[in-house]
Amino acid sequence: MPRTAFSQAQRIARRLGHPPLEEMTVGGASDGNFTAGMGVPTLDGLGAVGGGAHARDEHAEIAWILPRTRLLTTLIEELTGRSAGPQRRAEIT
């Protein structure tokens, strides 16, 4: 059975020492809602860690910017079979 993008993201998060990624369904105006609404498996929510979306207290936790960048970079590399290369890799580590 092929591995899903979500299960790959979960595995990468564990390997990088992140808290477990959880599957959930939410509303909102993300472009991902269009694809999910059509029944297309959609992986969304890999951006900044924070809170208060679209409100006065909206914020991103600075400590999580680099770890989330590593997670997303590694996921893209694995899904595409292409590496960011040593120079780009050094820039995000």
Image (cartoon, helix red, strand yellow):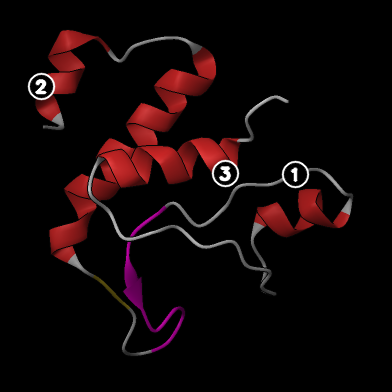
Q: Are marks 3 and 1 in contact (CB under 8 Å)?
A: yes
Main SS, magenta region, reads loop
Q: Nearer the viewer, residue 71 or 35?
A: 71
Q: Residue at x 81, y 43 (%)?
A: 40
Look at the image and say whether residue 48 sits in the magenta stretch: yes
Q: Residue farthest to the right?
A: 38
Q: Residues within 10 Å of mark 3 (few under 14, many from 20)?
A: some
User: Label 3, on which residue?
Assistant: 6
> Residues under labels 3 and 1: Cα distance?
9 Å
| Magenta residues, start to end | 47-55
Q: Quadrant of the C terminus?
A: top left
Earlier sequence position, callout 2 versus callout 1: 1
Q: Residue farthest to the bottom?
A: 56
- Residue type beneath disc 3: Phe
- In x, y percent, where is residue 22? 51, 62
User: Label 1, on which residue?
Assistant: 41
- Residue type beneath disc 1: Pro
Q: Label 2's element?
A: helix
- Residue type beneath disc 2: Ala
> Residues under labels 2 and 1: Cα distance?
32 Å
Q: Residue at x 18, y 46 (%)?
A: 66
Query: Viewed as shown, does residue 18 lie left or right of 87?
Result: right
Seen in the picture, residue 38 relative to 25 is either above or below; the reply is above
User: Label 2, on which residue?
Assistant: 90
Seen in the picture, residue 75 relative to 40 is either above or below; the reply is above
> Residues under labels 3 and 2: Cα distance?
25 Å
Earlier sequence position, callout 3 versus callout 2: 3
Q: Which mark is residue 32?
A: none
Q: Residues within 10 Å of mark 1 (few under 14, many from 20)?
A: few
Query: Viewed as shown, does residue 34 lie left or right of 14?
Result: right
Q: Residue farthest to the front?
A: 1
Q: Are marks 3 and 2 in contact (CB under 8 Å)?
A: no
